[in-house]
Image (tube, grey):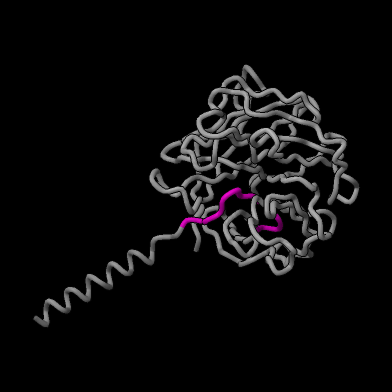
Amino acid sequence: MKTCRIVVLCLFVLLAGIVSSVSAKVRLADPFIFYENGTYYAYGTFSTDGILVFTSKDLKKWTNKGLALNKKDTNIPRFFWAPEVYKIGKEYIMYFSGNEHLYVAKSKSPYGPFKQIGTKPMLEEKAIDSSLFFDRKKKPYITFVRMNDGNNIWVAPLNKDLCSFDSTKMIHCFSVSQEWERAQARVNEGPCVFTKGKKYYMIYSANDYQSQKYGLGLAVADKPEGPWVKRADNPFLQCPDTLVGVGHNSFFTDKNGKFRIVFHAHESHTKIHPRNMYIGTLEFSDPKDKDHLVFGKDIIEAEEE
């Protein structure tokens, strides 16, 4: 009897060790990463109390550093979604969605605390998924999602304060138009833009985020105001490897100069939440078409230490 107890205890210790050695996934939807001074910072949708920040040295192992933006430092009641953080001068500026409106916050540190700028949203009507980019002359723009035709994508030039824009200058980029985008709901959202050469590239999400067919599309334009043309062979990324519900991306350049894309996917084929963060690469590798963007083969599953 005593021997059985010892065996059971040993098995318990062994199993506990195995469980403890298994790293948890990084629970961030709508993720955004930027790199500074040897450290990667990741922000995303998860907490009901604000916006979390994680840090990493290698993109694989991540440490939860707590709330970069605390709900207590805002007048926003709920729905803290889709943050992006940029260093502008000596300050860090965060664009994020709160209660289905667009907001801005600032901090002197990437860890926060970020403080809400003003008391009103950037736009009076409901809107989400704001993303900053600059044109070739360094003029700032913001792209975002309005909810007046399902979810559809717009762009506007930012004012010099980088915290506001003239709503009379908003320009419609596009709405749902391709067959693959109609799997569930009428949704184009999560836009993010980068420039290469004379082209502007926007990768966006389509279908309801709860759908396993949630995926990424690519549109290209010659100027921020458009016209934006969706690539005919979309979706750009949908159900890669064993992942489903892939969407809401952003871009960054890693410490080795590799151009990266970060996105989320469902927890599993049977469970949507919590959504988890994954990192891939973007390449212009077609010798016959130098403007043809492709998704690289390697995908990093971010793990929390």
Where residue 77 appears, x then y in whole percent?
68, 62
Give the left or right position of residue 190, taking residue 59 as reference: right
Task: Pick whichever, 295 or 205, lies toward us.
Answer: 205
Outermost residue, bottom side: 2
The magenta stretch spans residue 31: yes
Q: Residue at x 54, y 33 (%)?
A: 237
The residue positioned 22% from the left and 70% from the top of the image is 11
Quadrant of the rendered image containing residue 155: top right
Residue 119: percent from left, percent from top:
81, 60
The vertical placement of 194 against 40, above or below, is above
Residue reaching furthest to the right: 160
Residue 234 within the segment the image draws in magenta: no
Quarter of the image where the N terminus is located: bottom left
Query: Is residue 260 visible in this depiction of the protein?
Result: yes
Q: Residue at x 45, y 59 (%)?
A: 24
Q: Is residue 35 visible?
A: no
x, y percent for residue 102: 74, 50
Residue 31, x across and y down, in percent: 61, 50
Residue projecting furthest to the top? 288
Callout count:
0
Image check: 50 left or right of 73?
Answer: left
Instruction: Label the magenta part by its dominant secondary structure.
Output: strand
Name above or below for residue 156 compared with residue 90. above
233 above or below 209?
above
Q: To which quarter of the image does residue 206 belong? A: top right
Residue in front for this viewpoint, 103 or 234: 103
Start and end of the magenta stretch? 25-40
The residue shown at (60%, 30%) is 217
